Image: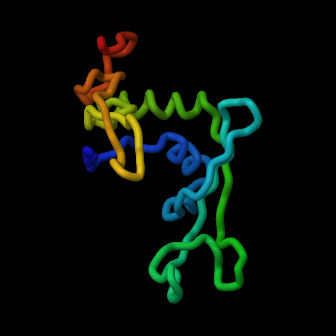
C-alpha cells in the first residue's frame, strides 16, 4: 500500500464552490448525484457542526440540533466545466490534473490491502502537466 500525501484537487468541488459563492468557503462537500444519463452532477456543500456526545462524538454532521439541515447549497456542475477547471489548474500550476504532481493515480481499493496506486498514465509518472496537445507516452 502506498500513502499519497498530496491529492489532486476535486474539480467538481472547485466548480461547485465557485457557483455557490463566498458563503461556501468553509462548507464541506457532502453529496453528488449524476443528473440522468448525462455527465452532469448535482453537487451539495454545507455547513457542519461537531457532535458533542454519543458514539460519534467529535465527528461532523450536516444536521442542526433540531434535526434540520444546516445552511447548505447545491450547484449543477457540467462535465465541460470540470474539464475547463482541469485545464486552468494545469496552466496555473504546471502540475498534472490527474495525479496532482505525485506521479501516482488511483488503481484500486480493498478492505484488506487499502488503497493501491499506479504510475499516472496522463503524465507517465512525472507529475507535471503534459505539453498542450501532446499526451505522455506510456
Residue 78: give x, y in percent of width and height: 64, 34
**What is the residue that sits farthest to the bottom in this orientation?**
53
Q: What's the image's color scheme?
A: rainbow
Q: Nearer the viewer, residue 87 or 108?
A: 108
In the image, residue 42 lies at what x, y percent? 68, 46
Give the residue at the far front of this rendering.
112
Q: Position of residue 40 (x, y in %)?
A: 67, 35
- Residue plotted at (36% across, 13% down): 135
Judge by depth and name the residue closer to the eye, 5 or 74.
5
Task: Indicate whether 14 appears above or below 117.
Answer: below
Relative to 62, 107 lies left or right: left
Report which quarter residue 101 is drawn in. Answer: top left
- Identified at 26% across, 37% down, the residue is 102
The total of numbered circles placed on residues is 0
Residue 57, x across and y down, in percent: 48, 83
Specify the quadrant that holds the N terminus: top left
Residue at screen point 68% across, 40% down: 34
Q: Is residue 71 above or below residue 67?
A: above
Q: Quadrant of residue 7?
A: top left
Residue 27 versus residue 106 in the image, above or below: below
| Relative side of 124 to 75, left or right | left
Asked which quadrant contains residue 100, the reply is: top left
Residue at image x 30%, y 14%? 138
Q: On the picture, is 76 further left or further right than 95?
A: right
Q: Which of 33 and 15 lies nearest the eye of the viewer?
A: 33
* Residue farthest toward the left in the current orientation of the protein: 126
Amino acid at each position: 500500500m502506498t500513502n499519497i500525501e498530496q491529492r489532486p484537487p476535486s474539480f467538481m468541488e472547485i466548480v461547485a464552490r465557485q457557483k455557490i459563492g463566498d458563503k461556501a468557503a468553509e462548507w464541506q462537500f457532502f453529496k453528488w448525484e449524476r443528473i440522468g444519463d448525462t455527465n452532469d452532477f448535482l453537487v451539495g456543500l454545507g455547513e457542519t457542526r461537531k457532535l458533542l456526545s454519543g458514539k460519534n462524538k467529535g465527528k461532523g454532521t450536516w444536521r442542526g440540533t433540531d434535526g434540520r439541515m444546516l445552511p447548505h447549497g447545491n450547484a449543477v456542475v457540467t462535465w465541460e466545466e470540470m474539464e475547463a477547471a482541469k485545464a486552468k489548474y494545469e496552466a496555473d500550476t504546471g502540475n498534472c490534473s490527474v495525479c496532482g504532481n505525485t506521479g501516482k493515480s488511483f488503481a484500486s481499493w480493498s478492505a484488506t490491502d487499502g488503497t493501491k496506486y499506479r504510475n499516472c498514465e496522463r503524465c507517465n509518472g512525472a507529475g507535471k502537466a503534459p505539453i498542450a496537445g501532446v499526451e505522455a507516452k506510456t
